[in-house]
Image (cartoon, rainbow, N blue to C red):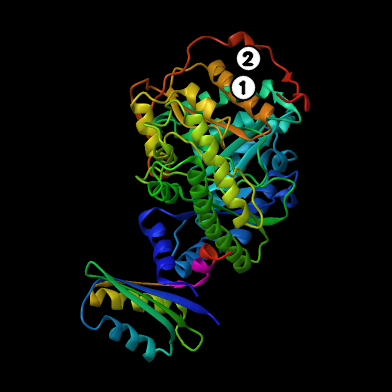
Amino acid sequence: MINIFEVAETNEMIEKENLDVRTITLGISLLDCIDADLKLLNEKIYQKIYEAAKDLVATGEYISAEYGIPVVNKRISVTPIALVGGAACKSPEDFVSLAKTLDKAAHEVGVNFIGGYSALVSKGMTAADEMLIRSIPQALSVTERVCSSVNLGSTRTGINMDAVKLMGEMILQTAQATADQDSLGCAKLVVFCNAPDDNPFMAGAFHGVTEADKVINVGVSGPGVVKTALEKVRGENFEVLCETIKKTAFKVTRVGQLVAKEASKMMNVPFGIVDLSLAPTPAVGDSVAEILCEIGLEHAGAPGTTAALALLNDQVKKGGVMASSYVGGLSGAFIPVSEDQGMIDAVTAGALTLEKLEAMTCVCSVGLDMIAIPGDTRASTISGIIADEMAIGMVNQKTTAVRLIPVIGKGVGETVEFGGLLGYAPIMPVNGFSCDAFIARGGRIPAPIHSFKN
Amino acid sequence: MKKTIITVVGKDTVGIIARVCTYLADNGINILDISQTIVQDYFNMMMIVDTNQTAKDFGEMAKDLEELGKSIGVIIKCQKEEIFDQMHRI
């Protein structure tokens, strides 16, 4: 039988160390809504989302009360809209009408984000894909809760450099379209290499075409729990360090598994996966960077950071995999800058640069995330940064992503405030040398060879 | 059997257990196990209870106990047992 110390440990994690279930994300297929009539398509999409998700928020709150664990976000992911809208949409504006419908549905059922305003263009773009991409700046400026993502490359297909070029321009245009909110639109826009079909985390969540009609995916969180556990093993060797992370990750993930199963049962929707990611928030004590410091670094970004992050990421997976029957999504450690107080401090102290962050993304999920850059950064430079990150994902057979926020009207040394879970960030300098001719080439980077690994 | 864990944490005072147990008895909730310690004047109690016989639903019971806790000056939490089982047992 459970004893008082175990109960106290669990409640301590929840109350003092920010253990929570970060998100219950309901994936909904919209493939059966496809219609050539735009008005009808909009109606069908709204109905399907409303019917599927009307009890989602209440379910999350009920589970939260029963187990005494916060379920912070309730969210929805849908089939990439470029696929759903292809038959009906004749212009980018037509796609924007679908974004508005998604936003309306999200408001109606009470979720704080809906993901899937997406296109999968890792090899080529259809006319619909391109129209959706071109509609992103407008779609994100006229909606509040819609999140957009574009998959630009994969290990199997290579990198679609035409789309990389286009996305550099679209990110800048999205920043301009939401300039009055410190370019907030870009916080809801992410590009991927090897995007997973079952990611529950925003902004990159979409409901892949390989998924069932509906599915429940859950993302856990617990940087604070890992950090506190590591405080007790200061000065011990790597074996002890790794065992501690693994055991903690197991406990954290078990909570996610329990919540996912319960939500699945209550909503009568199949359980998909638990995403093991250590997802930080701007709250003090809920930071991945603080774990790196606890491992032995003065600041995230100091020499040793990549190694520390690699071991953290790997141990989180090793502990988490046994705790859940199905693991998926991004599963690793997130290193967003604005959403992690320790990362913000590291940037402010001058310990962490964009280049070091890029190196860190080689060994963890996911990528260059929530990084504010000067608003006068050129589109081709953004495309260059994206291409670098996509190459890391393609060659290393992992998911990588880029979520950059060129803050219009602000430069290095200034700070941008997004509020809530999105946090705030000091604007980071970007290498100013040109890659115009590289980006202007157009076409594709071929898929890498799958043997002779070095 | 549906088991619930009730935890009571706060400054020690006379009659905490009595008042919690009275509420449980009045509502047909059977106590299966109690453990209690005092650390630096702080009262720390855990009860494992069986809620099969009570007419109250979980939310009501949790709310009542939270209110009772406030009137005593301690924090009372109700949680289904599974969260602890899942976390601490393979």
Q: Picture coordinates of residue A278 (x, y %)? A: 50, 45
Tag 2 residue? A439
Please determine whether, in this image, residue A59 is positioned above or below residue A180. below
Q: Is residue A193 visible?
A: yes
- Front residue of A391 and A374: A391
**Mark 2 belongs to chain:** A
Q: Picture coordinates of residue A205 (x, y %)? A: 60, 44
- Front residue of A422 and A448: A448
Left or right of A277, for residue B28: left
Tag 1: amino acid: Ala
Please determine whether, in this image, residue A62 is positioned above or below residue A186. below
Within 10 angstroms of label 2, few (less than 14), some, or many (20 or more) residues? many
User: Which of the two marks, 1 or 2, is nearer to us in this view?
Assistant: 1
Say which quarter of the image contains residue A339: top left
Q: Quadrant of the C terminus of chain A?
A: top right
State which region is magenta.
B79-85
Q: Is residue A54 visible?
A: no
Within 10 angstroms of label 1, few (less than 14), some, or many (20 or more) residues? many
Tag 2: amino acid: Ile
Say which quarter of the image contains residue A291: top left
Q: Picture coordinates of residue B73 (x, y %)? A: 23, 73
Residue found 49% across the figure and 27% down from its top: A357
Tag 1 residue? A387
Please determine whether, in this image, residue A401 is positioned above or below residue A257. above
- Front residue of A250 and A65: A250
Give SS at disc 1: helix
Residue found 34% across the figure and 45% down from its top: A284
